[in-house]
Amino acid sequence: MIWVALTGLGLLFIGVPVAFAIGLAGLVGILVADVPLSIAATRMFTGVDSFVFLAVPFYILAAEIMNQGGITTRLISIAQQATRWLRGGTAYANIGASVLFSGISGSAVADAAALGRVFISEMPKEGYTRPYAAAVTVASSIIGPIIPPSGLAILIAAVSGQSVINLFLAGVIPGLLIGLACVGIVFIDALRKRVPMPRPAHTGDGAARMIMEGVAVATLPLIIVGGMVVGAYTATEGGGIAVAYALVLSLFVFRGLDMAGLWRAIMKAARISASVYLLVAASSILSYALNLLGIASWISSAAEMFADSPVLFLFAVAFLMLILGTFLDIGAAILIFVPLLMPAVRELGIDPVQASMVVMITLAIGLVTPPVGVVLFVVMRVGRIGMYPLMRALMPFLLAELAAVALLCLVPEFSTWLPEKLNP
């Protein structure tokens, strides 16, 4: 098993793309287990042969259509309009825009890149330091993959046999909890008058129009999740409806999308979807190899140490995912480790939905922590900021988000209440 880990880490270290590094590590595992290499091709095809995975391209395409249609600027405007009277209002708007944007993009990287270009350049004009503006953007970006519709929830559902609807619903409160953690830090800074008042915002008819546009955009996740809860359609069918709704908004309501933009959205969604499926196929090889080498029994034995304290097991999982998230693609980490962890989770009597939320959020936090936090480097590049000043400004936000993770480990209801109430 050590040779598999060394192969994967070594390939990642020298810059081999994640999917190829994972697939080659899986091939090494198959060789070590003395199984014919031809089984790898079978595992790749069976890995992506899931009806749930059909939903992924639809949600990606819906997000790209709305991005090309200029939805981002409207979300920023509505968030600024709502917080214009508060000290630190633009920082609150940054966090609020991340919450709204999460219902569209489902990606921390997309959130940080899209919102960072605006807020990191605009907030210093009001008196914020550039590192602080970047820190708020980084910290709030991890809400993107948590609040539904979430691509990560689809991946977890596919590899763990859980309901996509339950995981979508379960992501709402934890996502808002992360947002509140960020808001809490800005609130403390506002009390100490470390953040400025925002500049005057638009009022009157323009403000009313922005609010209506914001409501129209925010309706998308409600339509998707609501229809799934009442049984009108599945997650995959909901993805198709999301694409149709995004097209109607972008082409006919906001009129910000032309045929060239639609083609760019389709091409980008196709590339992203292909990379996701390649990652799924490669991860299937590695998961199969690890199971051949006995990692499942090893995890089961390790879980027995926590038989009297399942909460400690959740904290251990959170710590492991936090480390993995710093250097491993978040989708790959889910595809490889969630199938291995879920039997132990169920054996210890932990709700799989709660465990899934802990895994999802800690992996997302790993995206914004060094040494290889992807979102961190995206914002450093977008905002032209060094690592040290950014991390110094980001640290209070990270501590608040880790406190939120601790609450999720200690209080299952934060994750399970909505699924139990709306989809019993």
Image (tube, rainbow, N blue to C red):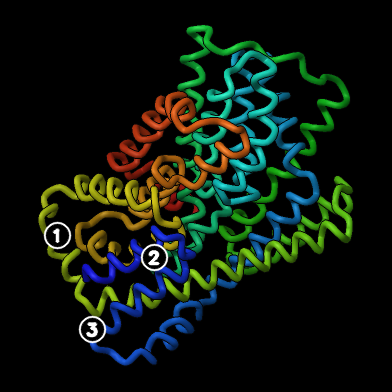
Quadrant in the picture for the N terminus: bottom left
Residue 224 horizontal/vertical position (percent): 64, 56
- Mark 1 highlights which residue? 302
Residue 90, disc: none
Q: How many marks?
A: 3
Residue 11, disc: 2
Q: Earlier in the sequence, mark 2 or mark 3?
A: 2
Label 2: few (<14), some or many (≥20) within 10 Å? some
Q: Earlier in the sequence, mark 1 or mark 2?
A: 2
Q: Are marks 1 and 3 in contact (CB under 8 Å)?
A: no
In the rendered structure, which amino acid carries the disc numbered 1? Ala
**Quarter location, residue 424:** bottom left
In the rendered structure, which amino acid carries the disc numbered 2? Leu
Q: Nearer the viewer, residue 142 or 225?
A: 142
Q: Nearer the viewer, residue 392 or 264?
A: 392
Residue 152 horizontal/vertical position (percent): 49, 57
* Spatial CA span between label 2 and label 3: 20 Å
Camera-near label (2 vs 3) is 2
Q: Earlier in the sequence, mark 1 or mark 3?
A: 3
Camera-near label (1 vs 3) is 3
- Element on which disc 1 rests: helix
Label 3: few (<14), some or many (≥20) within 10 Å? some
Residue drawn at the location 42% of the way across and 51% of the way down: 360
The answer to whether residue 219 is left or right of residue 30 is: right
The answer to whether residue 276 is left or right of residue 257 is: left
The answer to whether residue 29 is left or right of residue 392 is: left
Residue 91 horizontal/vertical position (percent): 59, 23
- Element on which disc 2 rests: helix
Residue drawn at the location 22% of the way across and 57% of the way down: 349
In the rendered structure, which amino acid carries the disc numbered 3? Ala
- Mark 3 highlights which residue? 33
Residue drawn at the location 31% of the way across and 78% of the way down: 28
